[in-house]
Image: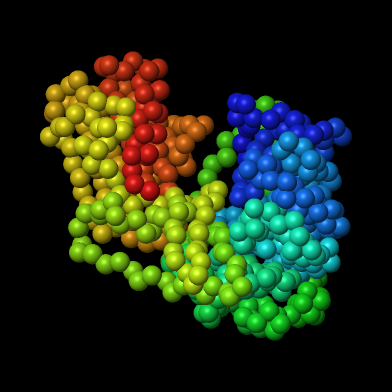
Amino acid sequence: MEQVGPGGPTHVGPFEVVGVLGQGGMGRVLLAAGPDGRLVAVKQVLAHFADDEAFRARFRREVTASRKVSGAYTAAVIDADPDAPTPWLASVFVAGPSLGAVVKVGGVLPEDVVRRLAAGLTSALAEIHRAGLVHRDLKPDNVLLAEDGVRVIDLGIARATEGEAEGDTGLTRTGFVVGSPAYMSPEQAEGHPLTPASDVFSLGSVLVMALTGRSPFAGTSTLKTLYDVAHGEPDLDGVPAGLRDLVARCLAKDPEARPTPAELHELIGPVAPAGRQWPSAVYGMLAAQRARIDGLLAGVPVEEPEPSPVPAPAPASVTEVDPVTVPTQDTPMPVPQAPPEETRPAGAPRTRRRRVAALVAAGVLLVAGTGGALYVRDRMNAPIAYAEVPRCQEAREEVPLDLRPSDTDSWIGTVDGAQMSCSGGAGTAASPTARVRWDLRLGGNAETNAATQRRHFQAAAAGQRAASRLGFGTEAYWEVAGPDWTCVLAVREGNLSVRVALKATPYAKGACETKAKEGARAALKAAQS
């Protein structure tokens, strides 16, 4: 949640824009206020969809279908304009953290709370399916824990199940469907047509995540996760006996074998009423969210610190992979076998050809399939995976600092990462006036590496001055410079951190910080992602 940047919209339809809630594959979501003062979430689609008349036709149909969905368990649609230059849809703003954020910050949920969660999600799916929709992207980040119960959000990639053959958009003309691999159904992973049973499978995976902190198909790569969803057995370790049968039925490979929402209600049984639906941590997160909204409304936004995650029960629990688009064909394309892990001698430098892990996380992997291809797309908030730090000779060409060769330059490479330090400037080799250091974490999947880097970065940031609104990087701080340096800026992005240190000559105080920002941005760009 942040302010709208320069040049951003001030109004969408009758709504006054307050801030930005986020951005996804279909567009961005704005926090806005109606003429009556009620807060709404306004979703604007991306420009290339707006230029597609077929998309507008489908968007119009989905708006009509979405209006039929009750707001009891979803964010009710209250207005839309599919014919605007930038089509938009406004729904009731629901205050509450996502299930993914709650588990990350507060840990897994107890069995009785998950049973309540399952009942709410089952009711939500019943409403969505009754309106003729399949959600297609039910995942922890699309489940909000509101004060009075659960809400399912982001029907933006749902498709009306009636009349799918007509008016296909550019997405459907090329045979693409969208979703998040760890929470896809087998038929979605393999590109088959979807029915409401697909959402039931996703529900099972979401419940496992709430109970264990991980998807039951948390593979070490996107391709491995897709293969496991389609062909592997779910990992139900940690699922309590009272919910294991319910979850296992939802995760049946055969859609016909999965229970319907009505049957799920019978399996879940009655849920006792409660004044407080969730653990106390959820209400603390709600209060913090309200404070940030109050700040935005007052024009004084409250800083949103990145919460420290609860330690995961196992390395696989922090695995998350990118949403993908899977081509559909007359003959279904089998999900390819996961590629073998690459091995290399310890300490050997990583070459620029070694890009598989980075490409999977960055969203540009192309793998040949049976008569087709698998495209992996990027998504907002996905961990950026850097594979290599630059050498000083390369960095000198890309970073706008005088990084002439110095005897203080150093490169250290290990199996689990690499460090590169480049110095230079008008001073002597022993006393440079500019220094840039890259610190790369490797050794695990993208999420694990980013989490490791984050822990080290936040430990170093203790007691330092936060550097906000840089426009790049995940988090940053200004280091107390001391007598040797005028300004020192540290920035983290995914599994890479960079540190730019500059002296007063030739950089005066104000110019020093501006130059440090330019240097840090270029230093991130110079690294191989």
Tell me the residue at 30%/66% (across/down). 342
- Is residue 211 among the parts visible in the rendering? no
- Tell whether 435 sits left or right of 273: left
Residues 190 and 500: in front is 190
- Tell whether 485 sits left or right of 79: left
Colour convention of the picture: rainbow
The image shows residue 482, relative to residue 239, as above or below, that is above
Residues 21 and 387: in front is 387
Q: Quadrant of residue 359?
A: bottom left
The x, y position of residue 194, in whole percent, is 69, 70
- Is residue 420 among the parts visible in the rendering? yes
- Tell whether 241 sits left or right of 373: right
The x, y position of residue 497, in whole percent, is 36, 43
Residues 176 and 238: in front is 176
Q: Quadrant of the N terminus?
A: top right
Tell me the residue at 44%/66% (across/down). 368
Residues 426 and 364: in front is 364
Tell me the residue at 29%/45% (across/down). 389
The x, y position of residue 15, in whole percent, is 79, 34
Q: Quadrant of residue 116?
A: bottom right
The image shows residue 162, relative to residue 15, as above or below, that is below
The x, y position of residue 385, in whole percent, is 40, 52
Count of numbered circles on the image = 0
Tell me the residue at 39%/45% (across/down). 457
